[in-house]
Every structure is written in structure tokens, then in C-alpha cells.
Image: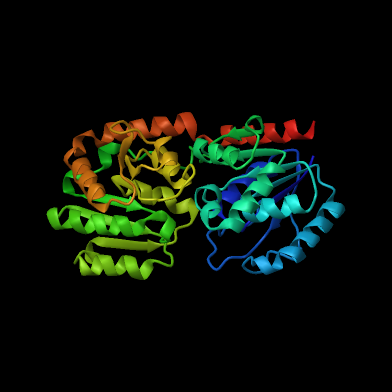
Amino acid sequence: MKIIYFSLDYTPHDHRFLSALSQSDHDVYYVRLQTGPRQTESRPVPENIHIVPWAGGQKIFAWKDLPRLTFDFRRLTREIKPDLIHAGPIQTCAFIAVLSGFRPILTMSWGFDLMKDVHRGRWWELATRFTLQRSTFFTSDAQVTRDMAVKYGMKPGKTVVFPWGVDLNHFTPKNWKTRKTENGITLFCNRSWEANYGVDVLARAFVRVAQQREDVSLMLLGGGSMGGDIRKILINGGVEGRVSFPGHIKNDELPRFYHLADLYISPSHVDGSSVSLMEALACGLPCLVSDIPANKEWVFEGENGWLFHDGDHNELAAKILKAIELREKLPEVGRAARVTAEKKANWPENARVLLEIYEKLSQ
């Protein structure tokens, strides 16, 4: 089967999907809508994937380019003659695919498109409805985004939810017996420093925690446009010296950083099934996350982690302090986290669901 995989940029998530597709019997053509200012994936596009040159993919997507990109995407469909287009996010890639007139189209939500972008204005809502009402099938990684898709016009019977998952052989637990929590607790977060992900909420919470305990440190991976604000919070709170900033870490090296931590924290305001959360669970880390709907599909209070009210840095601080007091229980919570990952986040197994959708749409 010939498949066009049409995505916004090239990220670790795209690499994950393209790697799975490269090992299938399908002939896959990768079309990239833009090249953003910050590249998060350093690994090359997997072998056996055709990288398609076209009018897009050279700069950040702009709405003024929509007519030109739509016409050129239509040209691609005529030349490649695919059996299926797999496209997302909804309001950009899937929208262009629908405008091209080609069918069948598998529209894939990336989480933020239905949890945030659809609320950005009337145009975004119209593009969402237009795309979903004309999509052949829909997939997402969380029930909350599937429900939103139905709300905006997707037929319920033409949807499937499956977590994107992680490599459970790459993200594995470190023996809890080697963790020296009595010598201190390390908090860990690798969410991007952007408004969607609430790292500023964590910074404020850490100031409160650090003022009460001297045995707690924080490790913040990554970076982003809110870097200045986050550092100002930490500096003004007098705790920047207890925070490490390793920067952007390649996927191959990530398990080592999860293993250095005792508690994973995600203060995200918007998410589907977070891959970094799945990685933390797979590494046997107790997880403390915001109580947004997608997180509640993965983290269960007192079992494999804890929840705090989204945006409430005071409650987050209180939950961190509670977890520290329960440090003797952390190994048990971490083992439960790994069990959750094994049951729900096995990427090779979950990827088979995608291939089954392809087969269904080709019939």
C-alpha cells in the first residue's frame, strides 16, 4: 500500500511513527509541512521512508501560504497516487489534505490541536469542523481528544484510540535499591518551557518546597520561550543553585536522566497521552502530574503516583512534600508505574493498531 504520512514538523513522535512504518510492507512517503525554529529530533528519517520535496517544509507554516500549499499537495497526490493519507495535526496538515480532495484520509490528533488550538478563534473552530466532517477515519492517543473530535463532527464509529507508547526495552527501571533517597530527593521534569506545559508552575512550587527542605533538588531538561520567566522565579526565590539545567537531551540518553530522579513531575495544562509521562512510568518513576483529563487516564492517586489541581503551585508543593514524607513507599509506587507502562504503553504492540487501521481503510 502507498501511504502519505503528512505531519507538521519532524519530532521524536514522527520518528517513532516513521520507524514503525519503515518496518512494514507499506510504501511510505513523508511530507513535512514546516521546519520550526527548534528541532527536537536529531535522528535521521528512518530508512525505507521516501522524503518528499514540495512547496512546504522549508520554513514555519503561514496561513497566507495555504492556497499554494494546497495546490502543491494536490499535485503530490496525483503523482504519488497513494492509497491512503495519514495526516495531522487537524487544523494544518489534515486540513490541507482534506482541501486537496483526496480520500481516504486518516486524521490524527496530536492532542494540542483539540485541547487548545480549536479554542484559538472562530477560524480554528471552522477548520476543525470542516476537516473532521470530511475525514474518513480518526485516531488519537487519549479518550478526551476522541470525545472532542466527535463533538466537532467526527462520526463516533469512525474513531479509534491507542496510546503512542514507548520502547519498554529502552526505558527500563533502575533498581530502587540503588536509589539513596535518604541522602536527598531529586525532582525531574522534561516538559518544554512553553505556556502549554506549566513549567513555571513547577518553578513556583519548588521555591516553596526548597524553603522548607534542604534535601530536595530539581532537574529541568529542555528549554523554551519561557526560560527567562522560569529562571527569574527560581532566582527571586533563592533556589536557582539547587536546580540543574542539562538542556536538550537526545532520546538515546534520556533513560539515564530518569534514573537520576526520584519523582517525575508534569505540570502540563494541555496534553494527550504524554510520551514523556509514559517514559517516566516505564522507568519506574513515581509520577506527580496535573489533573487534566489525559493525565488521569494514566496516573491514579496513591497507586502509581499523585495528581494535583492544574495550575495550583501551592497544591503541587504540598504534594511534593507529601511524596517526600512517603519516601519509603516510593519503590512500591515506582513498581506500579512500570506495570502501568507494560499494560498500556508498549509501542510495538500499540503500533499494530495503526497498521490495522490502514488495512481497514484500504478495503
| Placement of the C terminus among the 4 image quadrants | top right
Residue 244 seen in the figure: yes
Pick whichever, 61 or 9, lies toward us: 61
Occupied quadrant, residue 300: top left
Residue 73 placed where, x, y %?
A: 78, 58
Q: Specify whether 233 is left or right of 134.
A: left
**Display colour scheme:** rainbow
Q: Specify whether 332 is left or right of 117.
A: left
Residue 114 placed where, x, y %?
A: 54, 47
Residue 55 placed where, x, y %?
A: 75, 66
Pick whichever, 359 or 146, lies toward us: 146
Furthest residue in direction front, as rendered = 122
Q: Residue at x 37, y 67 (%)?
A: 227
Residue 208 placed where, x, y %?
A: 19, 56
Give the total of numbered labels. 0
Occupied quadrant, residue 147: top right
Q: Residue at x 26, y 53 (%)?
A: 313
Pick whichever, 188 or 208, lies toward us: 208
| Placement of the N terminus among the 4 image quadrants | top right
Name above or below for residue 215 compared with residue 237: above
Q: Specify whether 214 is left or right of 282.
A: left
Name above or below for residue 251 compared with residue 152: below
Residue 191 seen in the figure: no
Occupied quadrant, residue 347: top right
Name above or below for residue 321 compared with residue 9: above
Q: Residue at x 80, y 42 (%)?
A: 83
